[in-house]
Image (cartoon, grey):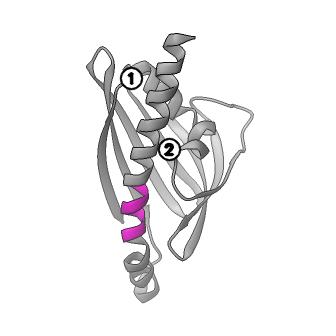
Amino acid sequence: MVHIHHKGEAAVPQQYLFDYVSDFRNATEWLFGITKLELKSEIEYGLGTVYEGGMKLGPKTLGAVFNMDRFEPPNVFHFDYVSGFEVRSLWEFRAIGDEVSELELNLEYVLPGGMAGRALGKIIEPFVAIAVRHSDNTLRKKIEAKYAASKTA
């Protein structure tokens, strides 16, 4: 199992950040490498939401079906693996100030065993780290711009 940990900040209130990020229909606006993201459940938001996604990481495109199995606004949500590429993610939100929030991401994925899995890991791990940093930067810019626009509307 590979574990990636990342923390980022945005100049928006915690609830605003949580609402935007936890609605994964928005993920195509900021999540780097997304090639496919389709809602697969009747539930559109929150606990029980199921998505099918594809992500290009370097030379590989990895597909997965995942569901939101923990949803505690405005503090935390978690996606668990259903099928495909085995990936799990825990997203935790904290207020640093009235209009500054922290997002902490813990991402875990499992690669196939043996030499093929180790080789795949060596290929995609640098791309995953780059994708997380790029996604953090894009998310920060998008969410701060949306929040600023909402205050003037």
Q: Nearer the viewer, residue 49 or 12?
A: 12
- Residue 58 visible, this orientation: yes
Q: Position of residue 9 (x, y in %)?
A: 31, 34
- Point 72% across, 44% down: residue: 40
Q: Residue furthest bottom?
A: 115
Q: Amino acid at mark 1?
A: Val
Left or right: 94 in relation to 41? left
- Point 35% across, 30% down: residue: 93
Residue 131 inside the magenta-drawn segment: yes
Q: Amino acid at mark 2?
A: Phe
Most common secondary structure along the magenta stretch:
helix
Instruction: Assign a secondary structure to mark 1.
Output: loop
Residue 11 vs 29, above or below: the answer is above
- Residue 71 visible, this orientation: no
Left or right: 61 in relation to 90? right
The residue pinned by badge 1 equals: 12
C-alpha gap between disc 1 and disc 2: 23 Å
The residue pinned by badge 2 equals: 79
- Which mark is first along the chain, 2 or 1? 1
Highlighted range, magenta: 126-132
Q: Quadrant of residue 50?
A: top right
**Circles 1 and 2: CB atoms closer than 8 Å:** no
- Point 68% across, 31% down: residue: 44
Q: Quadrant of the C terminus?
A: top right
Q: Quadrant of residue 97?
A: top left
Q: Residue furthest front?
A: 152
Q: Position of residue 59 (x, y in %)?
A: 54, 77
